[in-house]
Image (cartoon, grey):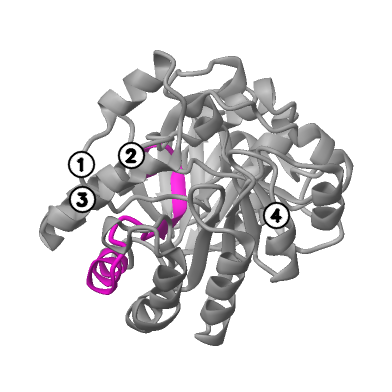
Amino acid sequence: MSVVVDNIGLLVTNDPALGEGPLGIIRGASVVFDRGLIVSVGPGGQIADVHIDAGGMCVIPGFVDSHTHLVFAGDRGDEFAARMAGQPYSAGGIQTSVAATRAASTSELASLTNGRREEARRAGITTVEIKSGYGLDAANETRCLQVAEQFSNDTTFLGAHVVPPEFGDRTDDYVHHVCTDMLAAAAPHARWIDAFCEIGAFDADQCRAVLTAGKAAGLGGRLHANQLSPGPGVQLAVEMGCASADHCTFLTDADIAALAASDTIATFLPATDFSTRQPYPNARRAIDAGVKVALATNCNPGSSYTTSMSFCIALAVRDLRMTADEALQSATLGGARALQRNDVGVVAPGKRADMVLLSAPSYTHLIYRPGVPLIHQVIEAGQLVVTPIT
């Protein structure tokens, strides 16, 4: 059964062949989709079996969140409050979530993850990547990935998040465990492999070993890079051909040059910098140098407990020095590129029918009216998954 979204005041397609500028904007538009795929995009008045009146609203592609940690148990609100009172952020708090996640039942983890996925959907996120990383042993990492794959086709094995307490200071032994027993158990449930390249987590050689083993197992590479300080992460991600280098808070000229000359996407996570009081990365500098970028929420219990891509867009414009157009495209098409997906992030014929109707005449209201709930309706794979509150 075909469906038309008609009377769209301003449609962002992300396809310059369809409309104005890099965002491919069409005014007075309509979109027809059938069986989960977009059939046609054009002027208003197209006909279909079912009619949805956008009432002059702005319609954008569904957000593509390419970096999340949705599978976890426990609460770290007290840690966050302490940090806001002046305690510095470190990777050590991850162990708190590991203990709670290991103690939770699989059904509890699935219920918690479902709640977060539904919250993200209400925030306009129609595609989401989900990492493991709070199990840190073969059984629990696999269990977390089995939960994650119920909610996403883009699941990521993050066994190299931090060293679990039972390994003490034996980091190299743990890396070997990640690359062998843990990877063998986790790989059937993952599309990607990731590692945390940072002081207090894993160094470049250890992360290279993890990414190499993951590639041999058929997994694509991603990397947590340059979050807490300058380091080798970004250039390692480029060296290893990773789809994305994520965080990129501290970028040197050499890092930017390496990214600009590569296909690796720099994924900025501004809600993390907000929550940890780290300095914000200068995305303007990277974009002007030709770096391809994405925005993601990094939803996790310790350093960015938000599912609001709208919030990330507002931060990106205010504090990362991105334009409104760049921020919106980074949160949609940029995220799709970071996941090497060509079926989402664009409103165009043949693409998945993912759209967000905003209670606003323009996407600029995501920045202009920060914190205001502007997500009116959400269509995901041709299904109306979020409807207006009446």
| Residue 61 drawn at (x, y percent) | 57, 47
| Contact (Cβ within 8 Å) of mark 2 with mark 1 | yes
Determine the CA span between mark 3 and mark 2. 13 Å
- State the SS at label 2: loop
Residue 63, numbered label: none
Specify whether residue 159 is in view. Answer: yes
- Name the kind of residue labelled 4 in the image: Pro
Q: Earlier in the sequence, mark 2 or mark 1?
A: 1
| Residue 380 drawn at (x, y percent) | 42, 54
Circle nearer the viewer, 1 or 3: 3
- Name the kind of residue labelled 1 in the image: Gly
Magenta stretch bounds: 120-146
In which quadrant of the rendered image does the C terminus lie? top left
Residue 232, numbered label: 4
Residue 99, numbered label: 3
Occupied quadrant, residue 205: bottom right
Residue identifier under label 1? 74
Residue 301, numbered label: 2
Q: Earlier in the sequence, mark 3 or mark 4?
A: 3
Identify the residue at image location x=44%, y=15%.
86
Determine the CA span between mark 2 and mark 1. 8 Å
